[in-house]
Amino acid sequence: MKSTIFLLLLSSVLLVCTLQAENPKTDYEKLAKELEVRELSTLMFANYNDANLRKIDVYLEKHPKSPEREKVLYLRAYSIWSLHRYEEAPPAYAALLKEFPKSKFSRIARIREAAAYLFSGQAEQALPRLQALQKDFPDRPEMYARELAYALSRSGNQDAALAFMNYVETKMLFSKKDRLLPRIKHHFDMVRMIGKPVRDFNVKNHRSGKEINPGTLKGKVVLMDFWATWCRPCLAELPHVKGTHGIFSQEGFEIFSVSLDDNQAKLDRMIVGKKMDWLHHYDGKKWKNELAVKFGVHSVPANLLIDQKGIVQGVNLRGKAIRKLVSKLLDPQ
């Protein structure tokens, strides 16, 4: 009798433990704790890395009907985006939007889905998504204006990009949203450089002391890259920059890196350690760097892609978008 009661109690305990282990809410709470998730009204933040991304995938596979899937799908897309895997990010955001079309994360998901297409050199995929956002939120251009301006320009619609930017600036001024305009206008001003000769400058090469100016760069396709050793997104972009240099440096492609550092020793160590074997400029003035001021750079990474004639052909390119446009400029056919 006692053994029977013991077995029943043991079975009950095991059943409870099993149910708890398979409880999607309990598993989500554990996942959120491990990822150190922070929630706002329509945003979530978490520690992102490959290990945590695998934990997210395990949860999604284990709980296909969980009420917490909306949050976990968002965390998956957010993590891929934050790891700068821009080619993988659009399907991740699309999966969230497909399963939860009325998700509280829908606006940010739509914007980042489009931006990820943009950053991976697929402006033609980004453009209709951003135009759909413009249609749905005509009075909220501050949400998508930067991305839409870039998408129009990179799709070969520079005139449309210029008209759109003028419209947004006017609309935001009349709508008394001018306090939000400076961070958008910085990007607009970069887009407005496209199709124009690069601004004149004359600086010294940090490593050789030789002059660098538009004249010395003419005849090459040049990526003028503003960065800093303390900038995590800059370091995330470095493999793409180095990869493009490795492929095209013998075909007339040059990189001209402009450092916004104020620690020369740290900069020099990184240049050597990362084998950044190209042109560099450093003056130790950080945001007051001579070229940063001249080109109106207020955030990094930032860049300009200049053709053989000294004409700006692209700005603020990321990921494989750099390689795609460099290839086109080196071989127009």
Image: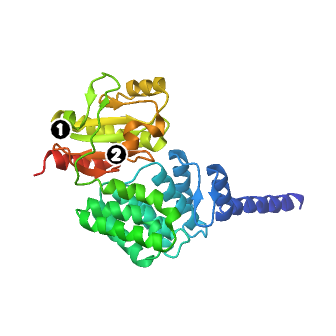
Residue 105 sits above or below residue 298 on the image: below
Q: Is residue 167 left or right of residue 265?
A: left
Label 1 sits on a secondary structure element that is loop
Q: Which mark is residue 218?
A: 1
Distance, label 1 to label 2, CA atoms, is 17 Å
* Location of residue 20 in the rendering, given as x and y in whole percent from the top left corner: 71, 61
Label 2 sits on a secondary structure element that is strand
Using a 10 Å C-alpha cutoff, classify the residue at mark 2 as few (fewer than 14 neighbours), some (14 to 19) or many (20 or more): many
Residue 159 sits above or below residue 31 on the image: below
**Which amino acid, mark 2?**
Asn
* Location of residue 105 in the rendering, given as x and y in whole percent from the top left corner: 53, 68
Q: For the point 26% across and 54% down, which residue is it?
A: 194
**Which amino acid, mark 1?**
Lys
Q: Residue furthest right?
A: 2
Name the residue that disc number 2 marks. Answer: 303
* Location of residue 202 in the rendering, given as x and y in whole percent from the top left corner: 29, 33
Q: For the point 40% across and 30% down, which residue is it?
A: 282
Q: Is residue 30 left or right of residue 193?
A: right
Residue 136 sits above or below residue 197 on the image: below
For residue 70, say whether it is visible: yes
**Quarter-wise, where is residue 68 in the image?**
bottom right
